[in-house]
Amino acid sequence: MAMSMTGCGEGVATAAASTARVEIRCVNNRFLKVSLRSREGFSQLESRIEGVVRDRVRRGAVQVSLDVAGPAAPASRSLDQAQLAAYLDQLEDFCATHDLPVPKSADGLLALPGILIDAPPSQAVIDGVWPLVEQALVLALDGLDRMRRREGDSMARDMHGTCDEIRGRALAIRQRVPAVLVEHRQRLHDRVAKIVEQQGMQLGEGDLAREIAILADRTDIAEELVRLESHLDQFAKLLTEDSPGRSLDFLTQELARETNTIGSKSADVAIAHAVVEIKTRVERLRELVQNVE
């Protein structure tokens, strides 16, 4: 079934004293884009996380937030003891020279450049924490899928209803066409008869029939109505398939094109009103389709 591109999910996995928490947020996007937000040291997991996400999500901008706590969390920073010792020696010399007491704590020195250095975790640490992260990621994706499916079902019902409304307007147009020709024939007959009477001429039925035939050919919208209904059938079928977003987007463009052609070919007021109503509903379909995976 069609799924929405919008949703969120959360997963928490625990092993021993360590916990991994993953939050996923997805919004609509033309292509799939995965980004990771986490503490320093987890960037090496980004490609693995993206691989798991790609197996479940095909389109959308996906943001993954990751946090690991406990012994399994890789240490992303370390203390440069040699640099700290050098700072302490300089501080003691300065205090002795200026007759100042030596601080009892080194807390103030920890903010100085070079004291805390980033230390990327080893491959062994990354491999060790990955199973816990993957478990939380799968749980978060399960929650994301449930939300996306619920919203997708709701949008599908709305789009089915909108397609039925378009069918109703198209049927009204089809039923109106014969009456349009009859009315135009009568108007044409009356106008020509008046001109002929003024000029003292006679109007042949063959001439009038020829003009009606030309008009009928010029304003024939039967082909456009058939294509419109065919697009609606395809639209309904695609809503039952997985990831139909791009195909649905193409069909909404075709629906709009056929509707515009119908409107340009017909000068009838009733048909023009029906075309406006169809255009409104096609635009609604287009807005909904933008959020279908």
Image (cartoon, rainbow, N blue to C red):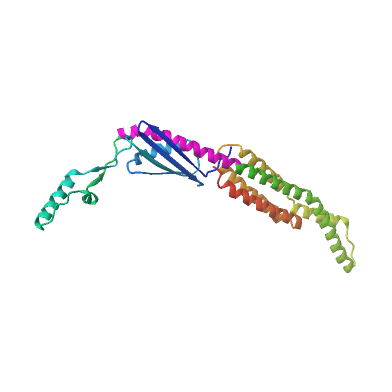
Question: Dividing the image into 4 quarters, which one contains the C terminus?
Answer: top right
| Quadrant of the image occupied by residue 72 | top left
Q: Front-most of 215 and 203? A: 215
Farthest residue toward the top?
16
Answer with left or right where residue 149 lies relative to residue 72: right
Q: Where is residue 136 in the image (x, y as percent from the top left)?
A: 43, 35
**Residue with the most extreme bottom position:** 198
Quarter of the N terminus within the rendering:
top right
> Is 233 located above or below residue 182 in the figure?
above
Where does the image place residue 13, in percent across and percent down from the top left?
41, 34
Q: How many labels does the image show?
A: 0
Q: Residue shown at 20%/48% (left/top)?
A: 106
Viewer-proximal residue among 17 and 261: 17
Instruction: Locate residue 107, reporting x and y percent.
Output: 22, 49
Q: Is 245 left, or right, of 214 in this rendering?
A: left
Task: Point out residue 68 in the picture as x, y percentages from the top left corner.
Answer: 36, 38
- Residue 254: say if magenta: no
Residue 71 as seen in the image, left or right of residue 254: left
The answer, for residue 278, to whether it is visible in the render is yes
In this orientation, which residue lies closer to the viewer: 216 or 86?
86
Asked if one can make out residue 31 in the rendered structure from this viewpoint, the answer is no
Span shown in magenta: 124-153
Q: Is the magenta stretch mostly helix, strand or loop?
A: helix
